[in-house]
Amino acid sequence: MSFSTHVLDAVTGRPATGLLVRLEHEGGVVAEGRTDRDGRIGGWEPEAGVHRVVFDTGGYLTDTFYPEVVITFTVTDPGDHYHVPLLLSPYAYSTYRGS
């Protein structure tokens, strides 16, 4: 099982480089890191159950309505890959389950 994310800055049309991301499970931090120059983080290995991925959008965007984006998802299949992309702008964001 693995987890990855890809964050894109919708204002610039470029990857969100250096954005702090944290993966949590049962109230504890499983992993934490910053997006690379392509806006990606990968290789994290969550357990089965409910997880939260927390994006520090306030630390990345200078002026934003959403200083933090939290996406809660469930890991059900231990053999599956979980990809949670984030499309980000100062006043909106969107996400989906990627592949």
Image: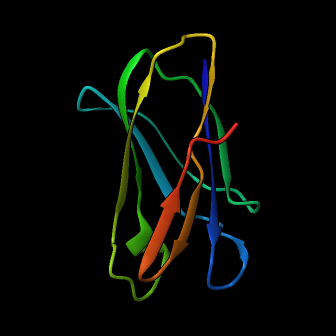
42 is higher (above) or lower (below) than 19: above
98 is higher (above) or lower (below) than 50: below
User: In which quadrant is the N terminus drawn?
Assistant: top right
47 is higher (above) or lower (below) than 93: above
| Residue 18 % position (x, y) | 60, 64
Tell which of 24 and 50 is nearer to you: 50
Q: Residue at x 44, y 87 (%)?
A: 62
Q: For the image shown, how many numbered marks are present on the structure?
A: 0
Outermost residue toward the bottom? 63
Q: Residue at x 40, y 89 (%)?
A: 63
Q: Residue at x 60, y 51 (%)?
A: 85
| Residue 93 % position (x, y) | 47, 68
Q: Decide if residue 14 is on the left or right side of residue 27.
A: right
Tell which of 92 and 45 is nearer to you: 92
- Quarter of the image for residue 52 reads top left
Q: Decide if residue 45 is on the left or right side of residue 73.
A: right
User: In which quadrant is the C terminus drawn?
Assistant: top right
Q: Decide if residue 53 is on the left or right side of residue 18.
A: left
| Residue 45 % position (x, y) | 56, 23
